[in-house]
Amino acid sequence: MDKQDIIAMLNEDFVAELETTMTYVFNSFVMEECDPSRVTEAISVDEMRHMWWLADLITKRGGKPIMEHKELNFGGESLEKMLQRQIDMESEGIDKYTYQIGVIDDEEVVGVLKHIRDEERRHRKEFRERLENIK
């Protein structure tokens, strides 16, 4: 895989992490229950860190991070819907990173993506536990 293809994939990841960060920050502000709000806030910081790692990989390969994003979907008005949206976002990220790990042949990139994917799995577990506690 050539460098430009890797940069393009990393920029897709960067934008997804940007959208996830903004969604989680907003949701943490409007969630009325303290524990899910604090967990969502803490995970938004992890997502920002993922952006940093991805931006570093992009710039090291001669690219620039893309900041353009689509309209955000926060999940809805209820805590249950917000948590479900967050679970879905984590699942989408896990699937995307798993695919990319299988096709990218850059050892440094693959190592970072594996680390991010492992954190996304932990995030999804945290959100699932909060969702189960309100049902």
Image (cartoon, rainbow, N blue to C red):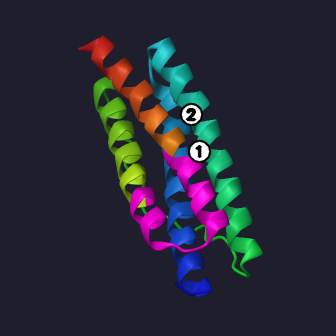
Q: Taking 32 as reference, is 5 above or below it?
A: below
**Considering the numbered disc 2 on the image, is that residue within a helix, a strand or a loop?**
helix
Q: In this view, does 31 lie to the left or right of 111?
A: left
Q: In this view, does 67 lie to the left or right of 131?
A: right
Kind of residue at badge 2: Ile
- The outermost residue toward the left is 135
Residue displayed at 53% across by 83% down: 5
**Considering the numbered disc 1 on the image, is that residue within a helix, a strand or a loop?**
helix
- Residue 25: which quarter of the image? top right
Q: Badge 1 is on which residue? A: 47
Residue 74: x %, y % from top left: 39, 42
Q: Badge 2 is on which residue? A: 43
Query: Are the residues tagged 2 and 1 within 8 Å (C-beta)?
Result: yes
The magenta stretch spans residue 113:
yes
Q: Main secondary structure of the magenta part?
A: helix
How crowded is the residue under tag 2: few (<14 C-alpha within 10 Å), some, or many (20+)? many
Residue 48: x %, y % from top left: 65, 46
Total marks placed:
2
Residue 30: x %, y % from top left: 47, 27
How crowded is the residue under tag 1: few (<14 C-alpha within 10 Å), some, or many (20+)? many
Classify the position of the C terminus by image quarter.
top left
Q: Taking 87 as reference, is 13 above or below it?
A: below
Depth check: give the residue in front, 1 or 85.
1
Q: Give the range drawn in magenta.
A: 97-117
Residue 47: x %, y % from top left: 59, 44
Q: Taking 41 as reference, is 73 above or below it?
A: below
Residue displayed at 50% across by 13% down: 34
Kind of residue at badge 1: Glu
